[in-house]
Amino acid sequence: SSAGSTKLMPCQEQPAAEDAAFISIQAFPALLDLPQELEVSAVSCGSRHTAVVTRGGELYTWGWGKYGQLGHGNNTSSDRACRVEHLVAKGLRVEEVVCGPWTTYVRV
């Protein structure tokens, strides 16, 4: 695993102090480490967040989440890719994702 790589795993609740959260901004592409069983079929980048769809139809998001654009039911930011559990709980399979500046659109 290389420095700066991101592991895909369910997110733990993070501190609520959004103003104190620091999200690193990386202007250059970086290798994303995925567990072997996860393969990415689609990716989209917003102005400060990223989303990927796996071949299994799951959505993972990370980055700045102040407007709820990460889809985790809160306004928490995260440097780690986190699975959007609401979609899994509803039994929805994600087909496509498009990130806007402060939004994320998902086709299920």
Image: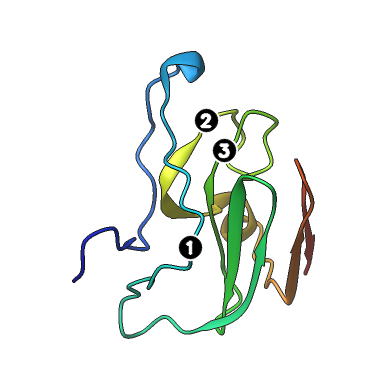
Residue designated by label 1: 28
Residue 9 point in image, percent of width and height: 35, 59
Q: Quadrant of the C terminus?
A: bottom right
Q: Are marks 2 and 1 in contact (CB under 8 Å)?
A: no
Amino acid under label 2? Thr
Disc marking residue 64:
3
* Residue nearer the viewer, 77 or 83: 77
Amino acid under label 3? Trp
Residue 70 point in image, percent of width and height: 62, 45
| Left or right position of 61 against 106 | left
Distance between the alpha carbons at the discs numbered 3 and 2: 7 Å
Q: Earlier in the sequence, mark 3 or mark 2?
A: 3
Q: Residues within 10 Å of mark 2 (few under 14, many from 20)?
A: many
Q: The residue tagged with tag 2: helix, strand or loop?
A: loop
When asked about the image quadrant of residue 91, the answer is bottom right
Distance between the alpha carbons at the discs numbered 2 and 1: 23 Å
Q: Quadrant of the N terminus?
A: bottom left
Q: Are marks 3 and 2 in contact (CB under 8 Å)?
A: no
Q: Residues within 10 Å of mark 3 (few under 14, many from 20)?
A: many
When asked about the image quadrant of residue 50, the answer is bottom right
* Residue nearer the viewer, 98 or 101: 101
Q: Nearer the viewer, mark 2 or mark 1?
A: 1
Q: Residue at x 69, y 71 (%)?
A: 94
Q: Residues within 10 Å of mark 1 (few under 14, many from 20)?
A: few
Q: Residue at x 37, y 63 (%)?
A: 8
Residue designated by label 2: 76
